[in-house]
Image (cartoon, helix red, strand yellow):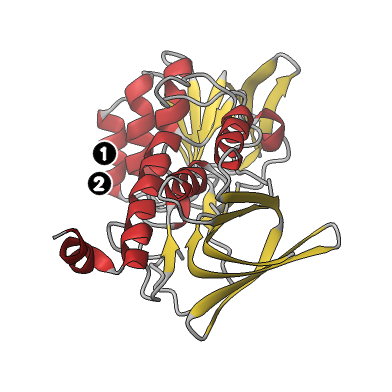
Amino acid sequence: MTSVYDVVVVGAGPAGLSAALNLVRARRTVLLLDANRPRNAATLRSHGFITRDGISPLELRRLGRDEVAGYPEATVTQAVVDRVEHDGEAWRVHGTWRGAEVDATARAVVLATGLREVFPALPSLRAFYGTDVHSCVECDAYDKAGQPLAFICEADDVVDRALLVGAWTDDLVVYTNGVATVSDAGRARLDGAGIRLDDRPLADLEGDRTGMTGVRLADGHVEPRSGAFVRPVWHADLDWVDAELDRDELGLVRVDRLGRTGAPGLYAVGDITPPGPEQLIVAAGHGASTAAAVHRDLVGGLEDLRDAVQ
């Protein structure tokens, strides 16, 4: 498949879908490419998205793809994108899927690929992830409110994130797994909030088919817990983008408030931009804002548009 479009959107999460939807409604021809490997695939229900609270994230993505695909200006294709490069005055996007190649040219590209997350090395963590173990406090803490919870974090932001989790329960144990360093001031903040801190190494999570029941430490002690929040390490895998991207210390793509990168015609939106992972409805809002910026830039900017109207 070799085609020319106004815009190629890479990634069909809420940010990419929202960008694509608003661009086709601006009568832009859009190619939406997605590998269908969402980070929240294990999550049974998503929350906080108005009119869709409690919907499966996969169902939300399906509805969004169907809405975009319903426009004649849109082409929705499953593909793993392996190259984005600037070719003269246009962008070339290449991808593959099951032996078939996608080779597209566009005036603009929107990167909305999301992040890859790496969890602490606990054998059973993935088995409970999405049901009893979660990473998004804003999305899932309400359903765990008042329960005995664990917060597992090996990163430097352990104190701030633990205090956030503690807003939903008065029985929280923070586990650093012997990795994260907590200062005396940080320990005092946790102690003042009634949050216990355990620096001992972890062995695994305990539980069965009915759910998580506890945290097992390396020394054999099992602390009863009915759920947990975990702080993953996030990676924005964008090595296939042949452009100079300004990245922050976490590897996220720095953009202006409307998603513009430093490369003309190249935009980034969603979790791959600071501050990183965000609620689905926030990502969708950012996608809409970026779509408006893309359209204005393709028209010729606000000044040219104002002159044309006058």
Quadrant including the C terminus: bottom left
Image coordinates of residue 187 in percent, x first then y, are 31, 41
Q: Residue at x 67, y 28 (%)?
A: 128
Q: Nearer the viewer, residue 106 or 147?
A: 106
Circles 2, 1 touching at the beta carbon (< 8 Å): yes
Above or below, 75 relative to 50 = below
Q: Could you say which disc has been placed on residue 223 in the image?
A: none
Name the amino acid, label 2. Ala
Above or below, 299 relative to 59 = below
Image coordinates of residue 288 in percent, x first then y, are 37, 46
Residue that label 1 marks: 188
Q: Nearer the viewer, residue 209 or 46?
A: 46
Q: Residue at x 26, y 39 (%)?
A: 188
User: How many circles with numbers are drawn on the protein?
Assistant: 2
Image coordinates of residue 54 in percent, x first then y, are 52, 19
Image coordinates of residue 206 in percent, x first then y, are 69, 25
Position of residue 64 in the picture relative to residue 168 (left or right): right
Name the amino acid, label 1. Ala
Q: Residue at x 70, y 21 (%)?
A: 207
**SS category of the residue bearing label 1:** helix
**SS category of the residue bearing label 2:** helix
